[in-house]
Every structure is written in structure tokens, then in C-alpha cells.
Image (spheres, rainbow, N blue to C red):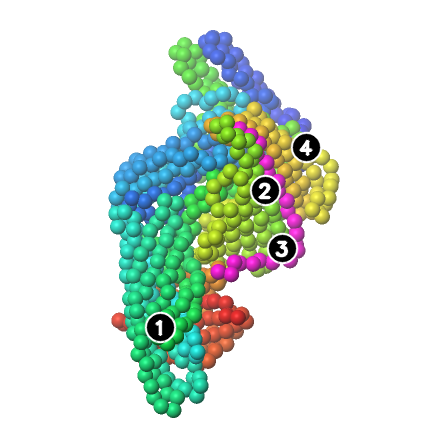
Amino acid sequence: MKRILELRESSAHAGNATSRWRTVFIALVLALTIGGAGQTPLAQAAAADAVEIKFELKVYPEKLPRICPKKALTLYASVSKTVNKVIGGKPFELPGDAPGPLVSGSVVSGSGELKKQLVEIDTPGSAVPFVFTADRPGKVTLKFTASIKNSWIGANEEVIGSGVKVEKEVTVKVGCKVKVGTVSQFSAQGAKLVATMDGEMKSDEQGNFTGSATVSWVGGLTVGYRDCSGVIDVAGSQADLTGNQDDSDRLAAEVTYLPAALTHTFDCGASQTIQTQVIPDPLVYSGPSFGGVSTQSQDLYEPTYYAMHGSAVIVVVPEEDEAVSLIPGSHQASWDDFPWIIGAFGLAITHAFKRKRRRVTHLNFKRWTILLLIFMLLLVSCQSGTDTPPADLQVTSTPPPDSQESDVLTIQADVVFGPGAFIFPDTEAGLADLSSYKSTLTLSFDGTRDGQIEQWSKTYVMLNTKEPAARQLTIEQTGDISGPDAVFIAEADGAAYERRGENACNATVIDQENSLIERLKPVGLLTGVVGADEAGAETVNDVAANHYTFDERAFGQLGLAKSTGEVWVASQGGYVAKYMLTTKGDADYFGEGIEGTLTWDYELTDVNQPVTFALPADCPAGMVDAPLLPDASNVLNMPSILAYDTSTSLADIAAFYQNELPNLDWTLVGEPTITETTALLDFMQGNQKITVIVTADAGVTTVNILLEKAQE
């Protein structure tokens, strides 16, 4: 097992003469200081190792969305803790969480108000919610500050000296514009109509959106229908756009279509012309403000003759400062779209093993020099009576030499870890080598808040397959907890899907650097252990595994809370097959007014067995795999739709796709419809359908390529 270090207790603690002399020296310093000053004694840490602890202040979402004036944006500030420890000459990082973060926030520049909200569930490492309300358009700088308590470190002293803080500043842009695009397809009795729209909404000072757009139409008839032939034409029309961004930073947009003039000329032995008006049903987008794609059914009505059934794709993309960037990957998911998750369990937990490891060397003479300086400062404080940090703590707010982060605080302190020989810092070890699996985590709390009973549970179920790469996460919750009862998240075929409660399924491009499912995967919510005890070999979930037990010392939390835990690690593969942890704590651990018991129950099953994924029926299709013309510009590539502008002629565009798509196993269906200003081509592959829609207007030719499931 690559990432598991099995060391004897004697090799982990014995033979470290420098550490023992250092502990004796600290005790001597404390004795001299306390004896000379008559101050309140500082409790000395029990047998412990000097380790480097890094605290990092994070604010979610990492990429803040633009918000509207007079509207609110919820941000989450949290502090993560990483313990850097060296055992047997091998460094490793133990990511953890900082209990009960004392985070405050303020407006540094710009106009607006930042208020701290009640933390719904103060689990260790939980993010503290803040609500920023904008006053007027512009840029606003917000500053978050976290005071580091000694209980966060895991040492046994009560308080670090005053002024030990970690800070972070973020900028919020106020003033919003949103691009809204739709592609609608309708069919009935041999006729097909396609409506495309590309519009923009702007917000007023109250945060309400308004706008308008031109709707372009493409029409076609099935040749030979009832021995008839003809053409169908719809003149360009208009649509009104309205919307708003609510206080939870979700965007609602509605497209209302105005009547469009339709002319139907056909010949069934005699030429006839019908002129009428058609009106599509309104479309509604409701989803995260960072944008996405939604699909829904839509009908087209003609007052006298007929109705046509169809479907629509709605694309919402916020505009950037300079210009709209529709290049794939230019937008990304917003972390604060899931406050119900963040509040439930510390999303502040960072996965240190996914990042570049930093190793800071502390030379012995440097440690002795710092200790002597502390000793001198303590003697001075004995005479002045001022508060000073405990002598076994070295604090620096300066980032490590290879870091440019200003929101990181590094502390070197004596921390007690478990007495056992088993070290398992990376709970994700071995999973990358499995072809597929199912992981389940039930997180539950039973306790009180301000004297009132509080009980809740949250269950995460994740399916993962390696080939093809895909994963699906469902989250269900019960009890005293806010948020939707059910959540669906998935990543497959380059698209990220999300559905909350009864809302429609939305999709966007997978952002590998800010993947939501990566942050919420069950195994990522577990904490590695240091110093667990062997408990024999067992078979769990049909897997041969080694069993280990541990307590709060495995996390460096001696004196902070009471924990009992067990972990079963697969003998072959080195992955966690089962993990159970129960932690009982009070306000020092959970936060002000809260006490109770928090439990983790994690299991890995169906290892290397077939995994079946099932997207909700209303989810958009995946990414469109179709070639672009060489002169393509203003490219939009999102689930279900690939769109771009070109200067190529309609005839050449139609010829290009008739030649290229069959090379990708797509089969042309029917005859293409090509006019002076429009083109329409349909292709099939299995149960999927691609429609190529081309419109030319005012010297600009736009290509929309739609991917959808074929109608049954």
C-alpha cells in the first residue's frame, strides 16, 4: 500500500533526543516564567511531537458571480487545518478541520453591507455564512478575518496570545447582464419549425432583469406528404425577456414570445397559400446564477388550424466585464450554490494530497534560537504582566517560501497523536485503481442547540466508473436541516448535471478545477488517522481487510472532543472498505450553544462491478461532438448545444456537415431544407439525434447544432 506507513511506536517516538530535550527545555522555561511572575499556570502538552500546522482561510464560491444592485449574495468563510508531520524521515500531510471558526467580515472598499448569519449546523470545519447586499454598481472589496484559538491546534494550552489571525480579501462585482439563448423545435403532420433566439437582459437598481431579442425561424416540409409539396416560412419575430436574481443567488428568467407571421404554400394538385400567426409557449429558466443549460417541452400554437408539439434548449451565460466569452470552460460552477451542503459538514476540508506538497525544513539551531527568544520574552512579560503565547508555539503569518498565499497561517506546536503504529492520512488511497465502485456515507447528528433538541441525518451515495469516466452522487436528508430533501449531481461525457429537489435538471461544462462532485464525494468527507491500533484481519463488504481502532488523538484533538473510530482497509488495493466514527463534543467543538454526538458511517461496495447510471429524464444531453468550420468564431459549447458564427455560405455549411457527420457514424435523415437565409439538417445515431440549424441575418451567419434523445 503506497500511502500507508506502518511504523512501530518505538520508531515513531523513541530515539528522538532533540525532541525530548526540547520538551524538557520548554518545561524549564514555563517553570521559571510561572515561578517568577505568579501568573496563571499554562498546562503543558502531554507526550507530543513538534509539528507544523497550517491554517488556511477560504471563501466560497471561489469565483464570485456578478450580482445585481440591491440583491444579496451568500458567501461562506471557513478555516481548514493541515498538519505536516515527518515520520521515519517521510513527510506527509494530514488534512483536518478547524472547529468552531471565529470568523468575522467587513466591507473594506465600495458600497454595500456584509452581515454574518447564524450557522445552521456547526459541525467541525463548517463554513460560516455571510450575506453581502449590494448598494450600487461597482466593485466591492470584502475582508474576512479568523481568530485562531489554541483548541484548533490540538495542544493543551487554553489560548494563544492575542492577535493571532488569518485574513483574506475578495472582490464582488455589482451590476449584471445576462445572455439568454434558446433553440426550439416543433413538428406536426410533416411540418417542422425551428426557432432560435439570442438575447440579453440587463438589471435595474432593484435587481430585476428586462430585455428583448429577435427570433429567427427555419421551416421545412416532408416531401411527398399526402402527395403534396410546398414550403413553409415564418418571418422573424420578437421575444421579451424578464427575470430576477433571488436572495439565494439563483436566477429565474422567462422568455415570452410575440406572434410570428407564418406563410404555408403547398400544392396538392392545386396551389394554395395559408397565412396565419404562431405563438410558442413561454420558456422559464430557473438555476444557478453562473449559468447553464436547461431543456423542457414547448408547444407552438396557431389560433385556427393546429398546434405543434416540441422541445426547447435554454442557455444562460452571464456576461463578463469586457465582452461575453462563450469559449468552452470560460464559466464555472459556483460553490455557494449549495449552502445546504456547506452548512451540513465542513466544505472547508481541503484535500492536501491533490495539491503540491510543501516541505518546510526547520533546523535544530533555528528552533533553539526561537526558544531562547521566547524565553527572553516570557521573562520580560513576567515583569510587565502582559499576555504572551504559550512557549511551545511558534507562530508566523508569513507564507512559506514557495507560497504567495496571504490567507495562510503556519504554527509549529506540540500535538498529541494516537499511540498505535498505523498511519493512514489519505482516505482516497487506492480508489483510482478501481474500475468501479459504490460509496455510501451517512452523516448524522443527535444533540441540542441552545437547549433545544436537534437531530438530522444526511446520506451521500456515489457511483463511480473509470471507463468511460463517469460519476453520480445523490444526497438525501432528514430532520432539523434546511435545503432540498433530495439532490442529484453527476458528471459524464464532459457535462456536469445538477438537480435540487423538484427543480429542473441543469447542466454545464465540467470544470476540473472547481468540480462540485469532487468536493462532495463521500470519501472526501472522511479524515485520515495517525496512530491507530491494529484490531486483526476481517472480511467486510466481501473484501479482505485489516481492521484498526482509534480515538480523538488520531486527529490531534486530545482534550477537544471524545471520539471513537474504526477503519477497515482492503488488504489488496489499500482503499477504505469501511469507516465508522463517533464524536461527542460541546461548544468548544461544535460551536456556541451546540453539544451532542456526530457520527460518520461510510462503506465501499460493488467494487469492480458493473455500475448503471440514470440521468433524470429532463436533463440536457451531453456535449456535442461535431466538427467546426475553420472560420468559426464566438463559439458556445455547452451540454446539448454547440453554436458559433461563420462567414461561410449556407450551401457550403450544409455540404460540410453532410460530408463530415457521416464520418462520425451519423446518418442523414430526409432531405435538407436550404433557402437563401436558412438551412436545416437532421442526423441520427442510435437513440440520439443531431439537428444542424443555420440562419443568416444582417450579414451574420449562425450555426446551432443540437444534440437530443430521439423521440420514442
Most foreground residue, 571 or 206? 206
Q: Name the residue under label 1.
A: 302
Q: Image check: 539 left or right of 285?
A: right
Quadrant assignment, res 167 = top left
Sequence-earlier tag: 2 or 4? 2
Closer mark to the observer between disc 2 and disc 4: 2
Element under label 3?
A: loop
Residue at image point 41% right, 32% down: 103
Q: Give the range drawn in magenta.
A: 594-618
Q: Which of 355 and 315 is in front in this view?
A: 315
- Closest to the observer, 199 or 364: 199
Secondary structure type for disc 4: strand
Residue 42 % position (x, y): 51, 16
- Residue 299, percent from left and from top: 40, 68
Q: How far apart are marks 2 and 3 (CA)?
A: 24 Å
Q: Mark 4 points at which residue?
A: 533
Q: Give the numbered dot on residue 442.
A: 2
Q: Residue 477, relative to residue 505: is it above or below?
A: above
Q: In which quarter of the image is the N terminus?
A: top right
Give residue 156's quadrant in the image. Answer: top right
Could you tell me if the residues under marks 2 and 4 are in contact, i.e. CB atoms within 8 Å? no
Q: Where is residue 51 in the image (x, y as percent from the top left)?
A: 54, 29
User: Residue flagged by tag 3: what amino acid is it?
Assistant: Ser
Q: Which residue is drawn at 42% across and 44% down?
A: 336
The magenta stretch spans residue 229: no
Disc 3 marks which residue? Answer: 435
Q: Of the residues under marks 2 and 3, which one precedes in the sequence? A: 3
**Of callouts 3 and 4, the N-terminal one:** 3
